[in-house]
Image (cartoon, rainbow, N blue to C red):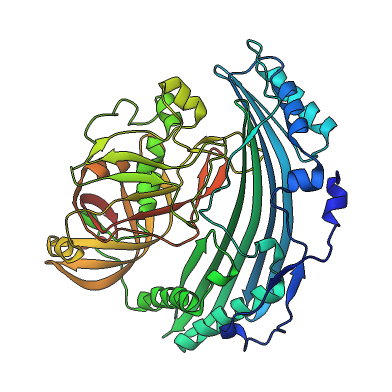
């Protein structure tokens, strides 16, 4: 059966997926009716649109008719939903479907790419001819049959997000709002943002692999505004994962809300620290944003292949102290950045970027791996079927070191701890960065003495990596909904770090006369 896109968008029928309300949400004033909706099949491209192996082989043959070193078809179907609750009212609600196929052919340094949202054979063949015309080389024989690879199990779901109705989600948002308001009388406004997505991909490659992956995603953010003594402060927290509805337990949501409230209320006591050059302690978890932005991007192979990264000739050389090890690992179950397969159909895995202070590897997609004479690291990622893949991070973190957090604090005579971040700017390649620190602490004579806020830290990623003089044994991934942007494409990622001491960094606080 082949269903055209306009017919599919209006196609809703009774199904068998059932989900009921958790008991802690039962008092939130929303009916408890069970949601029943049509389930998305494991492979909607074949089930709904008739894209079988014969069709896939015919499109691949057209795509590679002018020659190819590599080629792939990337099918994507994503149902996404978002909700915003402000002052007890749903101020925004959106649902959408993104669907199509991207067709890529690579010949040497040339890449031909085209996409279509119409999954009928004539449209796919037309897109294949467009991509094929851009890159030409020696003729190849496209596979006439494909080898389906086993589906991964990093993020399985009992009930997919496409089958969870708004009547299940709204009580959760109201619970978050009420919990936040109950924690402090100074809180006058709470906004709760919800997002979920049910994504299915199918990837066919020139060497005959056929990969399917079901990629769930969800995120909740709470923003809290409080007023006290004529002053107003705002703070937030969020949690995100490749999880299902049952993941949102009362304990997990309460912990998120408390974090947002604590971050907000401490700002009434906080001040800006003195400006200048000083030691900076990066708190475990969220400080992984510095590792990701100022260092990790410089280890993506495309920047090194083009010679724009400072690490372009550093493989095998010392880039940090011997107790520093940096890893990118997509195989951490249910993490936001987790992947069973990358977007080129390669098995995702673990790449040690820096081991005991020595740069060991870059993150490679198929193009860069072939040029370096290496195997791909499973790091080819794309925002959607509309984009060609490139080397990207997944879950990037620094491993535990030999020190304790208290030992690190005791080693600082005068400095700061950076705890939460709101934004920043990085020059990828050189690694120069500026990050805005929302919450932190002043350290004086080896003791944490006062909260600080609204601080800029300025430095260079590779230089800061060299200046890490202590690494604690408290490494953790941050559970926030991080999204990485690169060359106009955004992808979900995870990141983390233990508590680390950078011996010197520029702090943009207050000038003390």
Q: Quadrant of the N terminus?
A: top right
* For residue 192, side relative to residue 125 (left or right): left
Q: Residue furthest right?
A: 7
Residue at the image position 36 percent from the left and 35 percent from the top:
430
Question: Where does residue 361 sit, x and y in percent of width and height?
Answer: 34, 33
Report the label total: 0
* For residue 397, side relative to residue 482 (left or right): left
Would residue 75 be visible to someone looking at this image?
A: yes
Question: Where does residue 441 sit, x and y in percent of width and height?
Answer: 27, 68
Give 228 or 335, whichever is nearer the viewer.
335
Residue at the image position 23 percent from the left and 30 percent from the top:
317
Residue at the image position 66 percent from the left and 68 percent from the top:
83
Q: Quadrant of the C terminus?
A: bottom left
Would residue 434 be visible to someone looking at this image?
A: no
Give 487 or 355, whichever is nearer the viewer.
355
- Quadrant location of residue 413? bottom left
Give 18 or 109, whichever is nearer the viewer.
18
Question: Where does residue 4 sit, x and y in percent of width and height?
Answer: 86, 45
- Can you say whether 215 is above or below 254 in the image? above
- Can you say whether 451 is above or below 116 in the image? below
- Quadrant location of residue 320? top left
Question: Where does residue 280 sit, x and y in percent of width and height?
Answer: 23, 56
- Can you say whether 297 is above or below 7 in the image? above
Give 222 or 39, whichever is nearer the viewer.
39
* For residue 227, side relative to residue 23 (left or right): left
Residue at the image position 72 percent from the left and 63 percent from the top:
94
- Can you say whether 513 is above or below 142 in the image? below
């Amino acid at each position: 059966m082949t269903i055209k896109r306009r017919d599919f968008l209006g196609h809703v029928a009774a199904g068998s997926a059932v989900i009921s309300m958790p008991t802690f949400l039962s008092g939130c004033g929303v009916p408890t009716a069970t949601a029943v909706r049509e389930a998305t099949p494991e492979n909607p491209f074949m089930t709904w649109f008739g894209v079988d192996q014969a069709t896939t082989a015919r499109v691949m043959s057209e795509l590679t008719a002018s020659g190819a070193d590599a080629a792939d078809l990337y099918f994507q179907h994503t149902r996404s939903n978002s909700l915003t609750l402000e002052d007890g009212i749903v101020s925004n609600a959106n649902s959408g479907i993104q669907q199509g196929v991207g067709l890529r052919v690579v010949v040497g340094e040339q890449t031909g790419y085209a996409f279509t949202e119409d999954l009928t054979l004539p449209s796919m063949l037309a897109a294949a001819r467009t991509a094929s015309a851009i890159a030409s080389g020696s003729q190849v024989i496209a596979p006439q049959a494909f080898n389906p690879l086993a589906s991964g199990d990093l993020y399985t779901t009992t009930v997919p997000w496409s089958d969870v109705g708004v009547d299940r989600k709204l009580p959760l948002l109201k619970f978050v709002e009420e919990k936040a308001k109950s924690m402090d009388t100074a809180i006058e406004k709470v906004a709760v943002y919800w997002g979920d997505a049910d994504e299915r991909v199918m990837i066919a490659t020139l060497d005959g692999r056929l990969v399917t992956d079901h990629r769930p995603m969800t995120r909740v953010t709470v923003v809290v505004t409080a007023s006290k003594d004529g002053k107003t402060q705002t703070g937030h927290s969020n949690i995100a994962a490749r999880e299902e509805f049952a993941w949102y337990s009362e304990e997990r949501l309460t912990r998120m809300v408390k974090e947002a409230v604590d971050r907000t209320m401490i700002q009434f006591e906080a001040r800006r620290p003195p400006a200048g050059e000083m030691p900076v302690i990066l708190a475990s978890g969220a400080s992984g944003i510095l590792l990701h932005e100022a260092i990790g991007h410089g280890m993506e192979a495309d920047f090194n292949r083009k010679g724009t990264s400072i690490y372009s000739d550093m493989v095998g050389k010392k880039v940090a102290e011997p107790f520093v090890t940096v890893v990118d690992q997509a195989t951490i179950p249910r993490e936001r950045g987790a992947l069973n397969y990358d977007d080129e159909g390669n098995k995702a895995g673990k790449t040690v970027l820096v081991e005991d202070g020595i740069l060991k590897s870059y993150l490679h997609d198929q193009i860069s791996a072939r040029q370096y004479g290496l195997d791909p690291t499973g790091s080819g990622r794309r925002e959607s079927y509309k984009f060609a893949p490139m080397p990207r991070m997944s879950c990037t973190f620094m491993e535990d070191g030999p020190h304790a957090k208290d030992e690190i604090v005791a080693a600082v005579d005068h400095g700061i701890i950076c705890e939460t971040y709101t934004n920043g700017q990085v020059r990828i390649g050189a690694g120069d960065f500026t990050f805005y620190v929302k919450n932190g602490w002043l350290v004086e004579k080896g003791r944490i003495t006062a909260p600080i806020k609204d601080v800029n830290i300025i430095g260079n990623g590779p230089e800061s990596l060299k200046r890490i003089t202590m690494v604690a044994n408290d490494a953790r991934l941050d559970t926030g909904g991080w999204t990485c942007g690169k060359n106009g494409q955004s992808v979900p990622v995870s990141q983390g770090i233990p508590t680390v001491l950078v011996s010197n960094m520029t702090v943009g606080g207050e000038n003390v006369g």
